[in-house]
Image: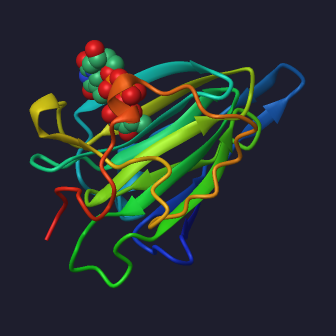
């Protein structure tokens, strides 16, 4: 397993699991407590989520202001562009973003700590995303950063305007967002 801190946001980790391929296909351990804990993911995961989205869908960018969640993102089918934005006002990288292509071909994972907003757009026809969270879902604590806030300037690989939930259409700009001190 190779763990690489992001160049701009070093708390965000790209994880490349060891994949065993053979004539039948492939096998890899999606998560293993001892190995991931020794790689810096020591907080326990308490909830696993799965979402399926069609091409051009953009989900996010979300975070919980209270009971913040760290997330371990993995694509089980298809390909997404996965993005983390630092929303910690006191951070020297506040408002900065990073993005990775995660797919069922590269099997890469992204670890996004608490303090970051998370979102993704779907590049393939369909994408099934599995992600582990270090705290439970509290909708009342969820906040949404506007996906196309020019102050953040995320370069989404989208051909057209994305498919967005009503909630995500009304995301807050970074300037107006309730975020972490
Ligand atoms: C997140 C979540 C949602 N739900 C229910 C609430 C809604 O009735 C339905 C869809 O929720 P939502 O539209 O918020 O789902 P996404 O837009 O995929 O939200 C997620 O997208 C971005 C990328 C994230 O990183 C977050 O984990 C999460 O906010 O699932 C639950 O029951 N439990 C949950 O943990």
Which residue occupies 56% across, 55% down? Answer: 15
Q: Nearer the viewer, residue 26 or 86?
A: 86
- Position of 75 relative to 99 (above/below): above
Q: Is residue 155 left or right of residue 48?
A: right
Q: Position of residue 135 (x, y in %)?
A: 18, 40
Tell me the quarter of the image containing the N terminus. bottom right
Which residue occupies 12% across, 39% down? Answer: 141
Q: Is residue 101 left or right of residue 179?
A: right
Q: Position of residue 167 (x, y in %)?
A: 32, 29
Q: Quadrant of residue 105?
A: top right
Q: Position of residue 178 (x, y in %)?
A: 16, 56
- Position of 69 relative to 58 (above/below): below
Which residue occupies 63% across, 54% down? Answer: 100
Q: Quadrant of residue 131?
A: top left
- Ligand 1: give its quadrant: top left
Which residue occupies 33% across, 85% down? Answer: 92
Examine the rendering and report whether any part of residue 138 can be seen. Answer: no
Q: Position of residue 85 (x, y in %)?
A: 41, 61
Farthest right residue in view: 23
């Amino acid at each position: 397993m190779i763990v690489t801190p992001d160049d701009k946001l070093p708390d965000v980790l790209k994880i490349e699991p060891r994949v065993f391929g053979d004539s039948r296909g492939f096998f890899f351990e999606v998560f293993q407590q001892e190995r991931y804990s020794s790689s810096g993911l020591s907080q326990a995961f308490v909830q696993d989520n799965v979402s399926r989205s069609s091409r051009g869908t953009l989900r996010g960018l979300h975070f919980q202001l209270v009971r913040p969640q760290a997330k371990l993102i993995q694509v089980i089918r298809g390909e997404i562009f996965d993005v983390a934005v630092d929303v910690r006002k006191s951070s020297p990288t506040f408002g900065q973003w990073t993005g990775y292509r995660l797919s069922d071909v590269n099997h890469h994972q992204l670890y996004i700590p608490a303090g970051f907003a998370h979102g993704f757009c779907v590049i393939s026809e369909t994408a099934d995303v599995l992600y582990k969270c270090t705290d439970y879902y509290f909708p009342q604590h969820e906040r949404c950063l506007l996906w196309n806030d020019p102050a953040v300037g995320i370069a989404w690989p989208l051909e057209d305007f994305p498919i967005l939930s009503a909630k995500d259409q009304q995301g807050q700009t970074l300037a107006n967002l309730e975020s972490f001190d």
